[in-house]
């Protein structure tokens, strides 16, 4: 930090400002080199091989980032002779998202095994530049950085059902992912309070299911705001967002939450529920008892037809089918569900009720369908209640126990426990000065302390394919508040996802984070400022930012 500030101010009278490789996430291997630094000037070009369209596209990001920092957009050129920032592919680099970044007085080279690797190298360079270097030359110390992510799945989840966010906001969300080296947007598109994606075969899903007549005020206060609310994405918009994400090496994993959290769909097609309705798109928060009827073949077909359109739209290897919080009360009283239990020879045992096994039946049936299309399912850890579908990836949210167990059963796991990674929870204990949030407390220091493979015997650790934080939006109605809840906690998440060996020195991380927030400032993000507050209390003088 001190070095960074000194770098920014010492030369303020002159032309040069200093870069700093202490970014977020910190690259895994940074070797300082002897020798003179590289001086990045307005005339420094970005160099690519002639006719490499992929690289040219990525080079344009870098040119844009440099322009944002310095005010001057570098040229993109091909040719060997120039001094500049060279982008190349290098098949010797092992990790397909890994990169090497070398700097000496003659130039900068970023190479990756794939364009994705080069992209992450560019992100590191971008974050190493001073956030504000308008009209200045930038001095970049000689260095050799070798870097690759720890986890292949680096996700962030976004609930657009409880509150709806237009595609421009989703794109800004994706920019935020890229800035933190993340590569998965888990897009929670349907829930009791609103169906948000056009499905051609079932037009009522968005005609009816995307709109609620009003919304409860606060935490199910019993009072309502009286304002109709809703929105949805057309399939064309969905395609546009998928392409925008792919350009930034972000895969979108869509979630159709089933067989629970389906009241909005039931409002559109009441015949798919056990009682036949009528149902309304839910106007309050919580877990609705109105779920898809597991005994009705039409309802199973409905789910498959929806998934078929989803698979058609989204190229992702994984399709998230939810599976969480499905109350069984309707199934217990439903003749069709009871008949299905008989037909399938489902029996309760010491561990589970027949209705819990009926839920496994639905999940397994959907898994078969998704696998028949060459994709795999992800489900919340409730899919382990009963019988776990054979190839399912488990998303462990109710703590890590489900994930630990699933890994030992040799199932892939994504860790996203409420205890550390629920960003809809409060980030400060001073609730009076915080916007209303879900009743939980996850400060950034806690996020940073999370270790995804704790409690897992070594031979099973490889089944932990990734880590994710979740943003449920019951109490988040504006995108500015989305940013506030994500940032800067997302920075701590990025460290968990990317760093192979973390010393877990929280203060060292904070030092880098303080500097990183200068980029947040320049990009205009509404991030939470509690970290400055804490620093001020402990007597450190860090910046001139107002404590929140
Ligand atoms: C649990 S996490 C849910 C969501 C809520 C969230 C609030 C999960 C699979 N289900 O439906 O929005 O808690 O934190």
Image (spheres, rainbow, N blue to C red):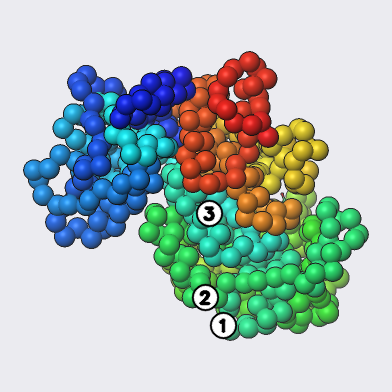
Q: Position of residue 159 (x, y in %)?
A: 64, 58
Confirm if mark 3 falls within 8 A of ligand 1: no
Quadrant for residue 417, please give it.
Answer: top right
Mark 3 element type: helix
The image quadrant where one finds the C terminus is top right
What is the residue that sits farthest to the top in this orientation?
539
Q: Residue 235, labelled with which disc?
A: 2
Q: Nearer the viewer, mark 1 or mark 3?
A: 3
Camera-side residue: 247 or 314? 247
Q: Earlier in the sequence, mark 2 or mark 1?
A: 1
Residue 119 appears anywhere in the view: no
Q: Disc 3 designates what residue?
A: 173
Observer able to see residue 213: yes
Residue ID for mark 1: 200
Q: Are marks 2 and 1 in contact (CB under 8 Å)?
A: yes
Tag 3: Cα neighbours inside 10 Å, few (<14), some, or many (≥20)? Answer: many
User: Residue at (38%, 59%) from the top-left corner?
Assistant: 247
Q: Which mark is residue 48?
A: none
Residue nearest the observer in this picture, 465 or 42: 42
Q: Nearer the viewer, mark 3 or mark 2?
A: 3
Q: Quadrant of residue 128?
A: top left
Q: Horizontally, is 121 left or right of 234 in the view?
A: left
Q: Residues within 10 Å of mark 2 (few under 14, many from 20)?
A: some
């Amino acid at each position: 930090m001190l070095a960074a500030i000194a770098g920014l101010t010492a030369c303020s009278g002159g032309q040069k400002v200093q870069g700093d490789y202490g970014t977020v996430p910190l690259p895994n291997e940074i070797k300082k080199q002897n020798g003179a630094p590289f001086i990045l000037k307005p005339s420094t070009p970005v160099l690519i091989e002639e006719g490499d369209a992929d690289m040219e596209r990525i080079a344009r990001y870098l040119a844009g980032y440099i322009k944002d920092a310095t005010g001057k957009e570098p040229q993109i050129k091909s040719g060997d002779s120039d001094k500049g920032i060279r982008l190349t592919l290098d098949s010797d680099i092992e990790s397909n998202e890994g990169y090497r970044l070398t700097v000496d007085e003659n130039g900068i080279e970023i190479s990756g095994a794939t364009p994705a690797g080069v992209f992450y190298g560019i992100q590191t360079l971008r974050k190493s530049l001073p956030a504000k270097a308008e009209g200045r030359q930038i001095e970049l110390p000689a260095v050799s950085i070798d870097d690759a992510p720890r986890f292949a799945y680096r996700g962030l989840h976004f609930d657009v059902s409880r509150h709806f966010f237009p595609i421009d906001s989703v794109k800004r969300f994706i920019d935020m992912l890229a800035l933190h080296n993340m590569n998965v947007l888990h897009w929670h598109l349907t829930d009791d309070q609103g169906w948000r994606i056009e499905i051609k075969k079932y037009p009522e899903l968005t005609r009816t299911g995307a709109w609620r007549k009003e919304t409860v005020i606060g935490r199910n206060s019993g009072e309502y705001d009286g304002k109709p609310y809703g929105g949805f994405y057309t399939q064309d918009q969905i395609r546009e967002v998928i392409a925008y994400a792919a350009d930034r090496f972000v895969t979108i994993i869509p979630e159709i939450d089933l067989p629970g959290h389906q009241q909005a769909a039931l409002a559109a097609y009441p015949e798919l529920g056990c009682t036949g309705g009528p149902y309304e798109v839910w106007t309050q928060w919580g877990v609705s008892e109105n779920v898809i009827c597991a005994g009705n073949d039409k309802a199973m077909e409905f789910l498959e037809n929806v998934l078929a359109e989803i698979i058609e739209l989204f190229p992702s290897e994984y399709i998230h089918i939810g599976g969480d919080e499905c109350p069984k009360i309707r199934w217990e009283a439903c003749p069709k569900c009871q008949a299905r239990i008989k037909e399938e020879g489902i029996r309760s045992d010491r561990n589970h009720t027949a209705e819990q096994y009926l839920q496994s039946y639905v999940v397994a049936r959907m898994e078969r369908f998704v696998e028949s299309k060459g994709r795999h399912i992800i489900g919340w850890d409730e899919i382990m209640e009963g019988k776990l579908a054979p190839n399912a990836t488990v998303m462990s949210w109710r703590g890590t126990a489900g994930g630990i167990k699933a890994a030992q059963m040799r199932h892939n796991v994504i860790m996203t426990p409420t205890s550390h990674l629920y960003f809809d929870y409060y980030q400060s204990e001073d609730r009076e000065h915080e916007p209303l949030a879900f009743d939980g407390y996850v400060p950034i220091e806690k996020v940073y302390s999370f270790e995804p493979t704790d409690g897992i015997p070594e031979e099973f650790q490889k089944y932990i394919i990734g880590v994710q934080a979740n943003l449920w939006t019951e109490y988040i109605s504006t995108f500015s508040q989305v940013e506030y809840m994500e940032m800067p906690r997302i920075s701590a998440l990025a460290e968990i996802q990317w760093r192979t060996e973390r010393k877990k020195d929280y203060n060292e991380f904070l030092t880098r984070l303080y500097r990183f927030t200068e980029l947040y400032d320049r990009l205009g993000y509404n991030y939470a400022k509690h970290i400055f507050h804490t620093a001020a209390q402990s007597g450190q003088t860090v910046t001139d930012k107002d404590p929140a």
